[in-house]
Image (spheres, grey):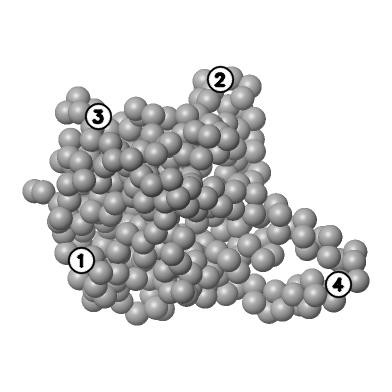
Amino acid sequence: MKPYGFDFFQVAGMTEEKPQLKAFLEAISVLQWVLSFLFLGVACIILMVYLMFTSLWPLPTLYFIWLVNDWKTPERGGRGTTFVRKWKVWEQFREYFPVKLVKTADLNPNKNYIFGSHPHGIMCVGAFACFSTESCGFAEMFPGLKSTLVILAGLFKIPLLREYLMCAGLCPVSKPSLVHLLSKSGKGNAVVIVVGGAAESLASSPGINRVVMKQRKGFVRTALEHGADLVPVYSFGENELFQQVIFSEDSLGRRLQGLFKSIMGFAPCLFVGERVALLPYRKPVITVVGSPISVPKCVTPTEKQVDHYHGLYMEALSKLFHEHKVSCGLSESHKLEII
């Protein structure tokens, strides 16, 4: 079945020369996002520490007092605003690659869903553009649904950064956060989890279609506990945006990455893009949302139930990949590797 209103060659559009000003604005919008992704957390920490040793020390002091009282807000749905999600800068961000959201089935707004987003890539460009901004038209494409991208919980412990993340509608991928989104926020919630996480980012490389899934069952258990239907999502082109240095499993580099991941929760990747090495390559990213897998509500699901729906999910993800790989620019010979 052809996706709703989708044409890969229209999306790619790479043969058309863009006006210089438009190309510049697109590059700046992506660069600010990359720099925020890499350095905003550290910059916020340095700023708050610096202010404590200046005449402005009352400001961070008052902020920290307020922070103590506001500590659990990210796990209670946060403070998402349509204003930030609709910033014009995200439209320029989308056009840089470009990013396209593709719908393959209708979703009932009277149900809740867990979207499993694959692959992680280096920076989750497809998931961010499609589910944390309105630049790709999620609200119009799925009327009645609200998408919430959930990310590393530790980021919400960083002062100032947490406010920016919440304004963008992001929430932590923690148990209390997921419980709130799926049981205390009514219906029509689509919680987007990048299932492969940091481990999958280390496998990101052009030409590779590999997802870390076989031992990732927590999101299936959560879906069963709340009766949320599972929806596989695949972002074609996500792994093409950066070149990464991939260390062998027994190398010192990989051991250091693993150690850092165990301490910090994410893995440092050595990657380069085009121009100043930080800008990703201008490659189309097509995020395809699959058909829902109906999941019953089981307050205490058994391992057999979890394994059953986990198996159904992997089958659906593989089917989604193979049905749409050619229309999304891959050859028929490309395979999806699930590890």
Residue at position x 27%, y 58% in the image:
230
Residue toward you, 43 or 268: 43
Nearer the N terminus, badge 3 or badge 1? 1
Which of labels 1 and 4 is toward the front?
4
Residue occupied by mark 1? 107
Amino acid at dot 4? Leu
Q: Quadrant of the C terminus?
A: top left
Q: Percent x, y for residue 151?
A: 50, 56
**CA gap, disc 2 to disc 4?**
49 Å
Amino acid at dot 1? Leu
Q: Percent x, y for residue 45?
A: 74, 58
Kindly indicate whether the residue at mark 2 contacts the one at mark 3 (C-beta within 8 angstroms): no
Q: Quadrant of residue 142?
A: bottom left
Residue occupied by mark 2? 250
Residue at position x 60%, y 73% in the image:
72
Q: Which mark is residue 335?
A: 3
Q: Quadrant of residue 105?
A: bottom left
Nearer the N terminus, badge 2 or badge 4? 4
Classify 7 as above or below 81. above
**How many marks do you count on the picture?**
4
Residue occupied by mark 4? 56
